[in-house]
Amino acid sequence: LMFPRESAHFVDGGEHRRLRAPLDEGIARIDQRRLRRRVEAMSADIIATFGTEGEADLLLSYSALISMLAVADLFGLDVGRGRELRDAVVALVAADSVAQAAYERFEEVLASALRSRRDAPPDDLTASFLSHPNLRSEQEVLQAMVVMIFASYGATTTWIAQTLGLMLTDPRFAGRLR
């Protein structure tokens, strides 16, 4: 995963600016209201499963999941594909014998999104990256997607988990949960 690739993460100067522009422009185009509605709906669906299961791992079953589902949605991936991405990332960061296979699965999910957007591009980050003149090959588009996902997933997962931890353990928040 961490070997140098042709992406904004691994290059400097003019090449970095060229590969970074599609990321910045893609983020600027995100419909914040739509994203909020989608995240609220996905969150409610996840939380609804807690009652039927009787318990929940708030890190893996909520924080890590909603983070990936939200970013997957930005790329036009459905919940099933978002779960596949999350599972691949969890296996990948374990850095054991399945890490390489997990990364290959991760890239395959993204590559299938690229293929499905070629002919009839919807309004999502995948289509935005595919049409951006600074991304000159499908591999550069794929790596832009990887950078965006990894840049957002870990930080968002940690932020949500830390917020939940405070809400559940800090007495200053107890009144807000009742």
Image: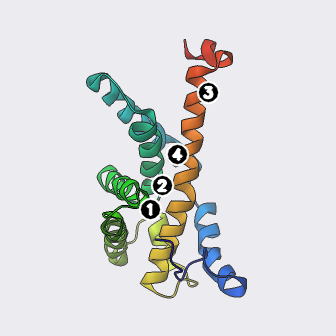
Given contact means CB atoms under 8 Å apart, are the residues at marks 2 and 4 in contact? no
Residue placed under numbered mark 3 in the picture: 166
What label sits on residue 67 in the rendered view?
none
Q: Determine whether, in the image, residue 18 is placed left or right of residue 135.
A: right
- Disc 1 packing (10 Å; few <14; some 14–19; many ≥20): many
Disc on the earlier residue, 3 or 1: 1
Q: Position of residue 19 (x, y in %)?
A: 61, 79
Q: Amino acid at mark 2?
A: Val
Q: Determine whether, in the image, residue 43 is placed left or right of residue 173.
A: left
Assign a secondary structure to mark 1: loop
Q: Is residue 104 visible?
A: yes
Residue placed under numbered mark 2 in the picture: 71
Query: Please, which residue is most extreme toward the left here?
Result: 52
Residue placed under numbered mark 1 in the picture: 75
Please identify, in this view, whether the residue under mark 3 or under mark 1 is nearer the observer: 3
What residue is shown at x 62% (from left), y 12% (from top)?
Answer: 175
Locate the C terminus by quadrant.
top right
What residue is shown at x 52% (from left), y 81% (from top)?
Answer: 5
Assign a secondary structure to mark 3: helix
Q: Quadrant of residue 168?
A: top right
Q: Amino acid at mark 3?
A: Leu
Q: CA distance from mark 2 to mark 1?
A: 7 Å
Residue placed under numbered mark 4 in the picture: 157
Q: Position of residue 129 (x, y in %)?
A: 50, 74
Assign a secondary structure to mark 4: helix
Q: CA distance from mark 3 to mark 2?
A: 24 Å
Given contact means CB atoms under 8 Å apart, are the residues at marks 3 and 2 in contact? no
